[in-house]
Each structure stands twice: as structure tokens, then as C-alpha cells.
């Protein structure tokens, strides 16, 4: 009986060890900039990193920290065109687009002072930080 118990324990241990080793390692390091922007890379992309002066096509979901969605085009076939450094997005999102690669997914934690706009849609409070999940779909042009 002791031998059977030992074999059962050994088998369970082996299965648990194999299951633990087969789980993909996910990088959970948060990148923090000097301005206060923080982001996680949820999925790595490929190709050259994006830079100021390039137009990119993105899918995004913007929400409050509570999870209340403010805007999303993520489940559509209509990406948004943004000129990096062109003040077409909030300062925080504009900064977070720098260095992204095609296919990369970033979750940006943008403090309220990097969300400043000249005017606000009725569903966005000027005093709230925003969480934006961005998917870089395509880089449209290259700059020298």
C-alpha cells in the first residue's frame, strides 16, 4: 500500500511540474517614463519601432481605471490614423506610441495631467487618469 501511495504522489508531482513548466512566461514589468506615463507590453510586435513623424493605424480601447469604457474601436475593421508627435492624441498616448512595433499591444496608464485636451467629450472627466489599450496595426510611412 505504501508503494502505491508513493507512486501516486510521484505521478501527481510529475504532472504538476510539467504543467508549471508548459505555462508561457508573460512579462509583467511596467515601464515608467519621466513624465509619469506607465505601460505594459501585453504582446510584442515585429519590425522597426515607430517614431515621431510617422503616421500609424491603431485600434484602441480607452477606459477609466474602474474599467468603464469611454471609447473603443478594437472590435471594428476601422483603425484610427494618428501622426506620432502631431498632437492628435493625448500627450500620454502620443508618448506611449513611440517605439511600438506592428502587432504590439500596450496597456497604457495615463495620468490625468497627460490627458489634457482643449475640450472634453461629455463622457470624459478632465481630472481622471485613463487606461488605454493600444494595438499598433500598421506604420504608414517611414521618416529618415
Image (cartoon, grey):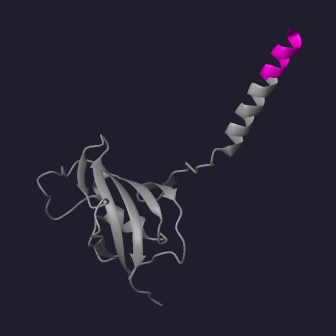
Q: What span is colored magenta in the figure?
A: 1-9
Q: How many marks?
A: 0
Above or below, 128 against 7 in this view is below
Most distant residue in the right direction: 3
Residue at 15% x, 58% y is 120
Quadrant of residue 46 within the rendered picture: bottom right
Quadrant of residue 114 within the rendered picture: bottom left
Most distant residue in the left direction: 122
Task: Verify whether residue 5 appears in magenta.
Answer: yes
Task: Verify whether residue 91 appears in magenta.
Answer: no
x and y, in percent, of residue 87 in the image: 28, 73
Residue at 40% x, 86% y is 141
Q: Quick one: 23 or 108, which is closer to the camera?
A: 23
Residue at 42% x, 54% y is 107
17 vs 2, left or right, is left
Quadrant of residue 78 within the rendered picture: bottom left
Amino acid at each position: 500500500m505504501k508503494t502505491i501511495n508513493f507512486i501516486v504522489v510521484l505521478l501527481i508531482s510529475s504532472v504538476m511540474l510539467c504543467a508549471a513548466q508548459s505555462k508561457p512566461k508573460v512579462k509583467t514589468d511596467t515601464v515608467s517614463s519621466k513624465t509619469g506615463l506607465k505601460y505594459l507590453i501585453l504582446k510584442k510586435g515585429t519590425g522597426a519601432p515607430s517614431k515621431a513623424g510617422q503616421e500609424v493605424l491603431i485600434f484602441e480601447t480607452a477606459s477609466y481605471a474602474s474599467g468603464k469604457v469611454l471609447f473603443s474601436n478594437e472590435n471594428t475593421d476601422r483603425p484610427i490614423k494618428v501622426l506620432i508627435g502631431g498632437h492628435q492624441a493625448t500627450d500620454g498616448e502620443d508618448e506611449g506610441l513611440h517605439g511600438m512595433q506592428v502587432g504590439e499591444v500596450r496597456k497604457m496608464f495615463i495620468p490625468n495631467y497627460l490627458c489634457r485636451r482643449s475640450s472634453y467629450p461629455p463622457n470624459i472627466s478632465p481630472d481622471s487618469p485613463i487606461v488605454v489599450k493600444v494595438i499598433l496595426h500598421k506604420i504608414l510611412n517611414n521618416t529618415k
